[in-house]
């Protein structure tokens, strides 16, 4: 019985020490957290007036001047590193004509990095807008382009459909040594194409690709006429087509025969 009481007393002492150790460890952790929180608060107070002093433009903008990008960024409040709204800066940069997307990141202690991706123009839409490779319209100065883009026309909201159709027709025609330069979609969704050699194709609303292929198949026979050049080809028929001709001058006839 005496031995049992001694063991119970030892177990009680061990439990007391474990409790004391656990409480002590908890208090140390709480004290440490308070110290860290106080330190962070003090650091924030000391650095609350940190300003953006350096702007870095990344990416490879071709049509957007770096000065224009920096000018757009400076419209935001750069007086506080912590309070700066990067989404607002992103919006300001993306408002620039050629900018498709912008990613903005703050880099401690005083730098703002902006990564810019521009639209890639593939066509002109209704003479005053541009279309990018996704079939989206945007407004920018086409005079900055170094190449002549195809001209596309159509009702508002049909730009994606027009661009997809242009790519399809262009692929078909290029394989057969024709160059498609312009496309128009009417309010009634009737399609017309213009080729580099001056020929206009009226496709109507149905079976557009099939009608383009009909023109490709029959054109070699049209070319044989020596005194005239194909002007308009009307393919709005289930079978066959109608051709309008431009009569050639004597000199043009001679040049055509030599070609």
Image (spheres, grey):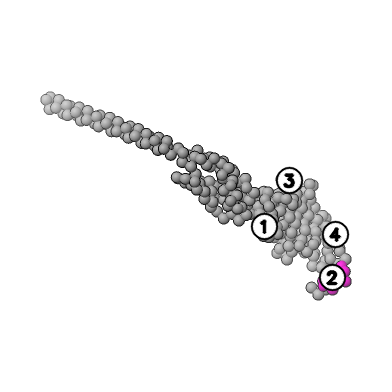
Q: Residue at point 74% right, 59% down?
A: 181
Crowdedness near tag 1: few (<14), some (14–19) or many (≥20) residues, C-alpha within 10 Å:
few
In percent of width and height, residue 33 lies at 35, 34
Residue at which label 1 appears = 145
Q: Which mark is residue 242?
A: 4
User: Is 248 above or below relative to 72?
Assistant: below
Q: Earlier in the sequence, mark 2 or mark 1?
A: 1
Q: CA distance from mark 2 to mark 1?
A: 34 Å
Q: Are marks 2 and 3 in contact (CB under 8 Å)?
A: no
**88 sits left or right of 250 in the view:** left
Disc 2 designates what residue? 252
The secondary element bearing badge 2 is classed as: helix
Q: Which of the marked residues, 1 or 3, is nearer the chain's N terminus?
A: 1
Q: Which residue is mark 3?
A: 156
The residues colored magenta run 248-256
* Label 4 CA crowd tier, 10 Å (few <14, some 14–19, many 20+): few
Q: Earlier in the sequence, mark 4 or mark 2?
A: 4
Point out the residue furthest to the left here: 2
């Amino acid at each position: 019985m005496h031995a049992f009481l001694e063991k119970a007393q030892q177990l009680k002492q061990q439990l007391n020490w474990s409790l004391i150790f656990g409480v002590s460890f908890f208090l140390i952790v709480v004290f440490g957290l308070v110290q860290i929180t106080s330190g962070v608060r003090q650091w924030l107070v000391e650095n609350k007036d940190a300003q953006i002093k350096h702007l870095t433009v990344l990416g490879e903008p071709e049509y957007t001047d770096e000065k224009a990008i920096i000018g757009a960024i400076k419209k935001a409040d750069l007086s506080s590193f912590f309070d700066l709204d990067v989404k607002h800066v992103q919006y300001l940069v993306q408002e620039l004509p050629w900018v498709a997307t912008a990613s903005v990141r703050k880099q401690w202690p005083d730098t703002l990095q902006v990564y810019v991706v521009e639209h890639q123009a593939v066509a002109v839409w209704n003479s005053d807008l541009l279309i990018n490779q996704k079939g989206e319209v945007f407004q920018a100065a086409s005079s900055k382009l170094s190449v002549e883009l195809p001209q596309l026309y159509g009702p508002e909201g049909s730009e994606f459909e027009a661009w997809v159709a242009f790519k399809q027709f262009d692929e078909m025609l290029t394989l057969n040594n024709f160059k498609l330069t312009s496309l128009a979609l009417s309010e009634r969704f009737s399609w017309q194409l213009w080729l580099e050699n001056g020929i206009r194709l009226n496709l109507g609303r149905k079976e557009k690709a099939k009608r383009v292929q009909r023109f490709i198949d029959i054109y070699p026979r049209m070319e044989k006429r020596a005194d005239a050049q194909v002007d308009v080809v009307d393919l709005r028929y289930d079978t066959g087509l109608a051709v309008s001709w431009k009569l050639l001058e004597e000199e043009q006839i001679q040049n055509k025969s030599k070609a």
